[in-house]
Image (cartoon, rainbow, N blue to C red):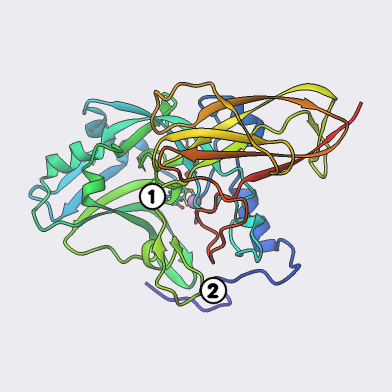
Amino acid sequence: MVRFEEDVSTPARLAGPGEGIGRDELSLATRNHGLPLEGLRYDVTPPGMHYVLVHYDIPYAEDDTWELTIGGRVDHPLRLSLNDIRSFKPVTTRVTMECAGNGRALLSPRPVSQPWLVEAVGTADWTGVPLRTLLNEAGVQDDAVDAVFTGADHGVERGVEQDYQRALPLDTALGDEPEVLVAYAMNGAPLPPQHGRPLRLVVPGWYGMAHVKWLRDITVTDEPFTGFQHTVAYRLRHDPDDEGVPVTRIAPRALMVPPGFPDFMSRTRIVRPGPVRLEGRAWSGQAPLATVDISTDDGATWDPATLETPADHRWAWRRWTFDWTATPGPHTLTARATDAEGRTQPLAQPWNRGGFANNLVQRLPVHCTD
Ligand SMILES: Nc1nc2c(c(=O)[nH]1)N[C@H]1C(S)=C(S)[C@@H](COP(=O)(O)O)O[C@H]1N2
Ligand SMILES: [Mo]
Protein backbone atom coordinates (compact mmCIF):
# COMPACT_ATOMS: atom_id res chain seq x y z
CA MET A 1 0.00 0.00 0.00
CA VAL A 2 1.27 3.42 -1.00
CA ARG A 3 1.31 6.53 1.19
CA PHE A 4 0.00 9.62 -0.58
CA GLU A 5 1.18 13.20 -0.19
CA GLU A 6 -0.97 16.22 0.61
CA ASP A 7 -1.76 17.08 -3.02
CA VAL A 8 -3.91 13.91 -3.08
CA SER A 9 -4.90 13.32 0.53
CA THR A 10 -5.00 16.06 3.14
CA PRO A 11 -4.26 15.54 6.83
CA ALA A 12 -7.05 15.99 9.40
CA ARG A 13 -7.59 19.65 10.26
CA LEU A 14 -9.90 22.05 12.04
CA ALA A 15 -11.69 24.86 10.17
CA GLY A 16 -10.31 28.33 10.93
CA PRO A 17 -12.39 30.96 12.76
CA GLY A 18 -15.36 31.90 10.55
CA GLU A 19 -14.28 29.47 7.76
CA GLY A 20 -17.35 28.30 5.80
CA ILE A 21 -18.06 24.79 4.54
CA GLY A 22 -15.53 24.02 1.77
CA ARG A 23 -15.85 22.37 -1.61
CA ASP A 24 -14.38 19.16 -0.10
CA GLU A 25 -17.03 19.06 2.65
CA LEU A 26 -19.79 19.91 0.13
CA SER A 27 -18.77 17.03 -2.11
CA LEU A 28 -18.96 14.62 0.85
CA ALA A 29 -22.31 16.11 1.90
CA THR A 30 -23.87 15.55 -1.53
CA ARG A 31 -22.80 11.87 -1.53
CA ASN A 32 -23.67 11.16 2.09
CA HIS A 33 -27.17 12.28 2.92
CA GLY A 34 -28.95 12.48 6.25
CA LEU A 35 -32.44 11.59 7.46
CA PRO A 36 -34.85 14.45 6.68
CA LEU A 37 -35.96 15.10 10.28
CA GLU A 38 -39.66 14.70 9.40
CA GLY A 39 -38.63 11.05 8.79
CA LEU A 40 -38.39 10.67 12.60
CA ARG A 41 -42.17 10.07 12.46
CA TYR A 42 -41.73 6.46 11.28
CA ASP A 43 -40.83 3.51 13.52
CA VAL A 44 -38.83 2.04 10.63
CA THR A 45 -37.19 4.58 8.32
CA PRO A 46 -38.78 4.43 4.83
CA PRO A 47 -36.54 3.37 1.90
CA GLY A 48 -34.17 6.11 0.80
CA MET A 49 -34.66 8.21 3.97
CA HIS A 50 -32.11 6.29 6.07
CA TYR A 51 -28.84 8.25 6.32
CA VAL A 52 -25.93 7.07 4.17
CA LEU A 53 -22.20 7.30 4.86
CA VAL A 54 -19.60 5.91 2.45
CA HIS A 55 -15.91 6.71 2.91
CA TYR A 56 -14.78 5.76 -0.64
CA ASP A 57 -16.96 4.42 -3.52
CA ILE A 58 -19.96 2.08 -3.45
CA PRO A 59 -18.58 -1.20 -4.91
CA TYR A 60 -20.50 -2.87 -7.73
CA ALA A 61 -21.51 -6.32 -6.47
CA GLU A 62 -23.07 -9.36 -8.15
CA ASP A 63 -24.98 -11.50 -5.65
CA ASP A 64 -24.19 -14.82 -7.46
CA THR A 65 -20.43 -14.43 -7.33
CA TRP A 66 -20.05 -12.84 -3.89
CA GLU A 67 -18.02 -14.79 -1.35
CA LEU A 68 -17.45 -14.25 2.35
CA THR A 69 -14.22 -15.79 3.58
CA ILE A 70 -13.59 -16.56 7.24
CA GLY A 71 -10.03 -17.32 8.28
CA GLY A 72 -7.14 -16.57 10.61
CA ARG A 73 -7.17 -18.21 14.05
CA VAL A 74 -9.97 -20.68 13.22
CA ASP A 75 -9.99 -24.48 12.92
CA HIS A 76 -11.92 -24.61 9.63
CA PRO A 77 -11.49 -21.65 7.28
CA LEU A 78 -14.75 -21.04 5.38
CA ARG A 79 -15.68 -19.73 1.96
CA LEU A 80 -19.41 -18.94 1.88
CA SER A 81 -21.70 -17.92 -0.97
CA LEU A 82 -24.77 -15.79 -0.37
CA ASN A 83 -26.91 -18.95 -0.63
CA ASP A 84 -24.76 -20.66 2.03
CA ILE A 85 -25.31 -17.69 4.33
CA ARG A 86 -29.06 -17.63 3.64
CA SER A 87 -29.29 -21.33 4.56
CA PHE A 88 -28.69 -20.56 8.26
CA LYS A 89 -31.70 -19.74 10.45
CA PRO A 90 -32.41 -16.02 9.87
CA VAL A 91 -32.67 -13.44 12.65
CA THR A 92 -34.27 -9.99 12.25
CA THR A 93 -33.36 -7.12 14.59
CA ARG A 94 -34.64 -3.54 14.57
CA VAL A 95 -31.63 -1.27 14.96
CA THR A 96 -31.17 2.49 15.15
CA MET A 97 -27.84 3.33 13.54
CA GLU A 98 -26.13 6.68 13.97
CA CYS A 99 -22.88 7.97 12.47
CA ALA A 100 -20.24 8.72 15.10
CA GLY A 101 -19.71 12.08 13.37
CA ASN A 102 -23.31 13.19 13.81
CA GLY A 103 -23.38 16.82 14.98
CA ARG A 104 -19.83 17.51 13.76
CA ALA A 105 -20.61 20.60 11.64
CA LEU A 106 -22.16 22.36 14.66
CA LEU A 107 -18.90 22.15 16.62
CA SER A 108 -16.65 25.12 17.06
CA PRO A 109 -13.92 24.85 15.90
CA ARG A 110 -15.34 22.54 13.20
CA PRO A 111 -13.40 19.36 12.35
CA VAL A 112 -13.22 19.35 8.52
CA SER A 113 -14.94 16.12 7.39
CA GLN A 114 -18.45 14.94 6.51
CA PRO A 115 -20.40 17.99 7.79
CA TRP A 116 -23.39 16.46 9.59
CA LEU A 117 -25.78 18.70 11.50
CA VAL A 118 -27.86 16.20 13.56
CA GLU A 119 -29.50 14.02 10.88
CA ALA A 120 -27.05 11.10 10.54
CA VAL A 121 -29.44 8.49 11.92
CA GLY A 122 -31.97 5.91 10.75
CA THR A 123 -33.74 2.75 11.87
CA ALA A 124 -34.11 -0.49 9.89
CA ASP A 125 -35.12 -4.11 10.36
CA TRP A 126 -31.95 -6.02 9.48
CA THR A 127 -32.12 -9.72 8.63
CA GLY A 128 -29.16 -12.05 8.57
CA VAL A 129 -27.29 -14.75 10.40
CA PRO A 130 -25.75 -14.14 13.83
CA LEU A 131 -21.99 -13.61 13.48
CA ARG A 132 -21.58 -16.04 16.38
CA THR A 133 -23.15 -18.84 14.28
CA LEU A 134 -20.59 -18.34 11.47
CA LEU A 135 -17.64 -18.03 13.86
CA ASN A 136 -18.72 -21.21 15.67
CA GLU A 137 -18.90 -23.05 12.31
CA ALA A 138 -15.32 -21.96 11.67
CA GLY A 139 -14.21 -22.82 15.23
CA VAL A 140 -12.43 -19.92 16.87
CA GLN A 141 -9.10 -20.90 18.45
CA ASP A 142 -8.26 -20.25 22.10
CA ASP A 143 -5.65 -17.57 21.51
CA ALA A 144 -8.00 -15.38 19.39
CA VAL A 145 -8.58 -11.77 20.52
CA ASP A 146 -10.19 -9.82 17.65
CA ALA A 147 -12.33 -10.44 14.57
CA VAL A 148 -11.34 -8.13 11.70
CA PHE A 149 -13.97 -7.27 9.06
CA THR A 150 -12.96 -6.17 5.56
CA GLY A 151 -15.24 -4.42 3.09
CA ALA A 152 -14.83 -4.56 -0.69
CA ASP A 153 -14.33 -0.78 -0.89
CA HIS A 154 -10.86 0.67 -1.26
CA GLY A 155 -9.51 4.20 -0.98
CA VAL A 156 -6.99 6.62 0.46
CA GLU A 157 -7.60 8.42 3.71
CA ARG A 158 -5.26 10.92 5.40
CA GLY A 159 -2.49 9.67 3.10
CA VAL A 160 -3.02 5.95 3.81
CA GLU A 161 -4.26 3.58 1.07
CA GLN A 162 -6.56 0.94 2.54
CA ASP A 163 -9.54 -1.38 2.35
CA TYR A 164 -12.25 -0.24 4.78
CA GLN A 165 -11.59 -2.41 7.85
CA ARG A 166 -12.88 -2.48 11.38
CA ALA A 167 -12.58 -5.05 14.18
CA LEU A 168 -14.57 -6.20 17.18
CA PRO A 169 -13.17 -7.79 20.33
CA LEU A 170 -14.09 -11.50 20.31
CA ASP A 171 -16.35 -11.25 23.36
CA THR A 172 -18.46 -8.72 21.43
CA ALA A 173 -18.29 -10.73 18.19
CA LEU A 174 -19.45 -13.91 19.98
CA GLY A 175 -21.79 -12.22 22.47
CA ASP A 176 -25.57 -11.99 22.51
CA GLU A 177 -25.98 -8.55 24.12
CA PRO A 178 -25.89 -7.19 21.46
CA GLU A 179 -26.15 -10.02 18.95
CA VAL A 180 -24.01 -9.03 15.96
CA LEU A 181 -25.50 -9.94 12.56
CA VAL A 182 -24.09 -10.62 9.12
CA ALA A 183 -27.08 -9.10 7.33
CA TYR A 184 -28.32 -9.59 3.76
CA ALA A 185 -31.70 -7.85 4.01
CA MET A 186 -32.91 -4.42 5.09
CA ASN A 187 -36.64 -4.05 5.80
CA GLY A 188 -37.35 -7.41 4.13
CA ALA A 189 -35.56 -6.67 0.82
CA PRO A 190 -31.97 -7.30 -0.34
CA LEU A 191 -29.60 -4.60 0.95
CA PRO A 192 -29.55 -1.54 -1.34
CA PRO A 193 -26.07 -0.96 -2.85
CA GLN A 194 -25.38 2.09 -0.68
CA HIS A 195 -26.21 0.14 2.48
CA GLY A 196 -23.78 -2.70 1.76
CA ARG A 197 -25.20 -5.02 -0.87
CA PRO A 198 -24.98 -7.95 -0.64
CA LEU A 199 -23.65 -8.36 2.94
CA ARG A 200 -22.92 -6.13 5.89
CA LEU A 201 -22.20 -6.33 9.56
CA VAL A 202 -24.80 -4.94 11.97
CA VAL A 203 -23.57 -4.25 15.50
CA PRO A 204 -26.64 -3.09 17.47
CA GLY A 205 -25.91 -0.20 19.84
CA TRP A 206 -22.59 0.74 18.24
CA TYR A 207 -21.92 3.84 16.16
CA GLY A 208 -22.10 3.38 12.38
CA MET A 209 -18.38 2.84 11.65
CA ALA A 210 -18.58 -0.66 13.20
CA HIS A 211 -21.28 -1.87 10.76
CA VAL A 212 -18.89 -2.84 7.93
CA LYS A 213 -20.64 -2.83 4.52
CA TRP A 214 -19.80 -4.95 1.43
CA LEU A 215 -18.39 -7.50 3.87
CA ARG A 216 -16.05 -9.91 2.05
CA ASP A 217 -13.72 -11.25 4.76
CA ILE A 218 -13.59 -11.98 8.47
CA THR A 219 -10.15 -12.73 9.89
CA VAL A 220 -9.74 -13.83 13.48
CA THR A 221 -6.45 -12.54 14.95
CA ASP A 222 -4.35 -13.35 18.02
CA GLU A 223 -3.33 -9.70 18.39
CA PRO A 224 -5.43 -6.56 18.74
CA PHE A 225 -6.22 -4.98 15.37
CA THR A 226 -4.24 -1.80 14.68
CA GLY A 227 -5.71 -0.71 11.32
CA PHE A 228 -6.31 2.92 10.32
CA GLN A 229 -10.01 3.01 11.27
CA HIS A 230 -9.05 1.99 14.84
CA THR A 231 -5.74 3.63 15.67
CA VAL A 232 -5.96 6.82 13.57
CA ALA A 233 -9.69 7.41 12.95
CA TYR A 234 -12.60 6.98 15.37
CA ARG A 235 -10.80 7.95 18.55
CA LEU A 236 -11.76 10.71 20.97
CA ARG A 237 -8.78 13.04 21.09
CA HIS A 238 -8.29 16.60 22.23
CA ASP A 239 -4.84 17.10 20.72
CA PRO A 240 -3.44 15.52 17.55
CA ASP A 241 -0.85 13.46 19.45
CA ASP A 242 -3.20 12.13 22.16
CA GLU A 243 -3.50 8.35 22.08
CA GLY A 244 -7.24 8.86 22.47
CA VAL A 245 -10.12 6.61 23.45
CA PRO A 246 -11.86 4.38 20.85
CA VAL A 247 -15.39 5.29 19.78
CA THR A 248 -17.74 2.37 20.43
CA ARG A 249 -21.37 2.58 21.60
CA ILE A 250 -23.98 5.24 20.86
CA ALA A 251 -24.48 7.93 23.51
CA PRO A 252 -28.10 8.87 24.37
CA ARG A 253 -29.75 11.35 22.02
CA ALA A 254 -33.24 12.75 21.40
CA LEU A 255 -34.30 14.51 18.21
CA MET A 256 -37.48 16.43 17.47
CA VAL A 257 -39.50 16.50 14.26
CA PRO A 258 -39.30 20.21 13.43
CA PRO A 259 -42.85 21.48 14.16
CA GLY A 260 -44.93 23.78 11.94
CA PHE A 261 -43.56 24.65 8.50
CA PRO A 262 -40.13 25.85 7.34
CA ASP A 263 -38.69 28.88 5.64
CA PHE A 264 -36.99 27.57 2.45
CA MET A 265 -33.49 28.99 3.07
CA SER A 266 -33.11 29.45 6.84
CA ARG A 267 -35.30 26.44 7.66
CA THR A 268 -36.59 28.44 10.63
CA ARG A 269 -39.89 26.94 11.72
CA ILE A 270 -43.16 28.85 11.80
CA VAL A 271 -45.97 27.68 14.11
CA ARG A 272 -49.39 29.16 14.90
CA PRO A 273 -50.31 30.18 18.48
CA GLY A 274 -52.15 27.54 20.49
CA PRO A 275 -51.66 23.81 21.11
CA VAL A 276 -48.74 22.22 19.22
CA ARG A 277 -47.94 18.53 19.62
CA LEU A 278 -44.16 18.11 19.64
CA GLU A 279 -42.85 14.66 18.72
CA GLY A 280 -39.59 12.92 18.04
CA ARG A 281 -37.42 9.90 18.74
CA ALA A 282 -34.82 9.06 21.35
CA TRP A 283 -32.31 6.24 21.68
CA SER A 284 -29.22 5.01 23.48
CA GLY A 285 -26.72 2.28 22.55
CA GLN A 286 -25.42 2.13 26.11
CA ALA A 287 -27.96 1.51 28.90
CA PRO A 288 -31.58 1.49 27.65
CA LEU A 289 -33.28 4.84 27.17
CA ALA A 290 -35.02 5.96 30.39
CA THR A 291 -36.52 9.44 29.93
CA VAL A 292 -36.86 12.35 27.51
CA ASP A 293 -37.24 15.92 28.80
CA ILE A 294 -38.37 18.92 26.79
CA SER A 295 -37.59 22.59 27.17
CA THR A 296 -39.53 25.24 25.24
CA ASP A 297 -37.55 28.15 26.74
CA ASP A 298 -33.99 27.39 25.56
CA GLY A 299 -33.11 25.15 28.48
CA ALA A 300 -34.34 27.32 31.37
CA THR A 301 -37.06 24.83 32.43
CA TRP A 302 -37.67 21.16 31.57
CA ASP A 303 -40.71 18.89 31.62
CA PRO A 304 -40.95 15.16 30.86
CA ALA A 305 -42.15 13.96 27.46
CA THR A 306 -44.34 10.84 27.14
CA LEU A 307 -42.62 7.76 25.70
CA GLU A 308 -45.11 6.34 23.18
CA THR A 309 -43.42 3.23 21.75
CA PRO A 310 -42.87 0.39 24.23
CA ALA A 311 -39.28 -0.67 24.91
CA ASP A 312 -39.75 -3.99 23.06
CA HIS A 313 -37.02 -3.32 20.48
CA ARG A 314 -33.93 -2.98 22.68
CA TRP A 315 -31.75 -1.44 19.95
CA ALA A 316 -34.30 0.84 18.27
CA TRP A 317 -35.33 4.41 18.98
CA ARG A 318 -38.57 5.19 20.81
CA ARG A 319 -41.20 7.77 19.90
CA TRP A 320 -41.92 10.57 22.37
CA THR A 321 -44.57 13.32 22.40
CA PHE A 322 -45.05 16.56 24.31
CA ASP A 323 -48.01 18.97 24.24
CA TRP A 324 -46.91 22.59 24.01
CA THR A 325 -48.99 25.75 23.92
CA ALA A 326 -47.24 28.16 21.58
CA THR A 327 -47.41 31.90 22.29
CA PRO A 328 -46.52 34.60 19.74
CA GLY A 329 -42.79 35.37 19.45
CA PRO A 330 -39.51 33.47 19.07
CA HIS A 331 -38.87 30.24 20.99
CA THR A 332 -36.06 27.71 21.20
CA LEU A 333 -37.16 24.08 21.61
CA THR A 334 -34.86 21.39 23.01
CA ALA A 335 -35.21 17.68 23.78
CA ARG A 336 -32.86 15.74 26.06
CA ALA A 337 -32.54 11.96 26.45
CA THR A 338 -31.27 10.17 29.57
CA ASP A 339 -30.45 6.47 29.81
CA ALA A 340 -31.08 4.03 32.66
CA GLU A 341 -27.58 4.61 34.04
CA GLY A 342 -28.02 8.38 34.19
CA ARG A 343 -26.02 9.24 31.05
CA THR A 344 -27.60 12.29 29.47
CA GLN A 345 -27.02 14.87 26.76
CA PRO A 346 -24.78 17.84 27.49
CA LEU A 347 -26.11 21.39 27.11
CA ALA A 348 -22.65 22.67 26.09
CA GLN A 349 -20.69 21.03 23.26
CA PRO A 350 -18.46 18.07 24.16
CA TRP A 351 -15.59 18.85 21.78
CA ASN A 352 -13.01 16.44 20.30
CA ARG A 353 -10.81 16.71 17.19
CA GLY A 354 -12.79 14.22 15.11
CA GLY A 355 -16.17 15.55 16.21
CA PHE A 356 -17.18 12.03 17.30
CA ALA A 357 -19.88 10.80 19.70
CA ASN A 358 -20.99 14.36 20.24
CA ASN A 359 -24.50 14.27 21.65
CA LEU A 360 -25.06 17.96 22.38
CA VAL A 361 -28.81 18.67 22.62
CA GLN A 362 -30.58 19.79 19.42
CA ARG A 363 -31.69 23.47 19.60
CA LEU A 364 -34.64 24.27 17.36
CA PRO A 365 -35.51 27.93 16.79
CA VAL A 366 -39.24 28.38 16.17
CA HIS A 367 -41.16 31.53 15.30
CA CYS A 368 -44.76 31.64 16.50
CA THR A 369 -47.04 34.02 14.62
CA ASP A 370 -50.76 34.37 13.71
N1 LIG B 1 -17.13 -0.99 3.93
C1 LIG B 1 -17.57 0.12 4.53
N2 LIG B 1 -18.39 0.00 5.59
C2 LIG B 1 -18.85 1.11 6.21
C3 LIG B 1 -18.45 2.40 5.80
C4 LIG B 1 -17.60 2.49 4.68
O1 LIG B 1 -17.23 3.59 4.22
N3 LIG B 1 -17.18 1.34 4.07
N4 LIG B 1 -18.91 3.50 6.49
C5 LIG B 1 -19.25 3.26 7.90
C6 LIG B 1 -19.85 4.40 8.54
S1 LIG B 1 -18.79 5.62 9.04
C7 LIG B 1 -21.18 4.48 8.81
S2 LIG B 1 -21.82 5.76 9.69
C8 LIG B 1 -22.11 3.41 8.38
C9 LIG B 1 -23.26 3.98 7.57
O2 LIG B 1 -24.15 2.97 7.19
P1 LIG B 1 -25.35 3.32 6.19
O3 LIG B 1 -24.78 4.08 5.02
O4 LIG B 1 -25.97 2.05 5.84
O5 LIG B 1 -26.29 4.22 6.97
O6 LIG B 1 -21.46 2.43 7.57
C10 LIG B 1 -20.18 2.06 8.02
N5 LIG B 1 -19.69 0.95 7.25
MO1 LIG C 1 -20.00 7.17 10.32
Front-lying residue, 301 or 343: 301
| Residue 20, position as x, y percentages in the image | 74, 63
Whether the residue carrying mark 2 lies under 8 Å from ligand 1 is answered with: no
Question: Where, by quadrant of the figure, is residue 106 drawn?
Answer: bottom right
**Label ID, residue 11:** 2
Mark 1: amino acid: Ala
Side of 60 relative to 41 (left or right):
left
Using the image as rendered, state which of residue 108 and residue 185 is in the foreground: 108
Element class at badge 2 = loop
Image coordinates for residue 296, horizontal then vertical, percent: 72, 36
Report if the beta carbon of the residue with label 1 is closer than 8 angstroms to ligand 1: yes
Residue 177 shows in the view: yes
Label placed on residue 152: none
Residue drawn 22% across and 54% down? 219
Residue 164: x and y, percent? 39, 57
Q: Quadrant of the N terminus?
A: bottom left
Amino acid carrying label 2: it is Pro
Q: Is residue 57 visible?
A: no
Asked which secondary structure carries label 1, the reply is: helix
Label annotation for residue 210: 1
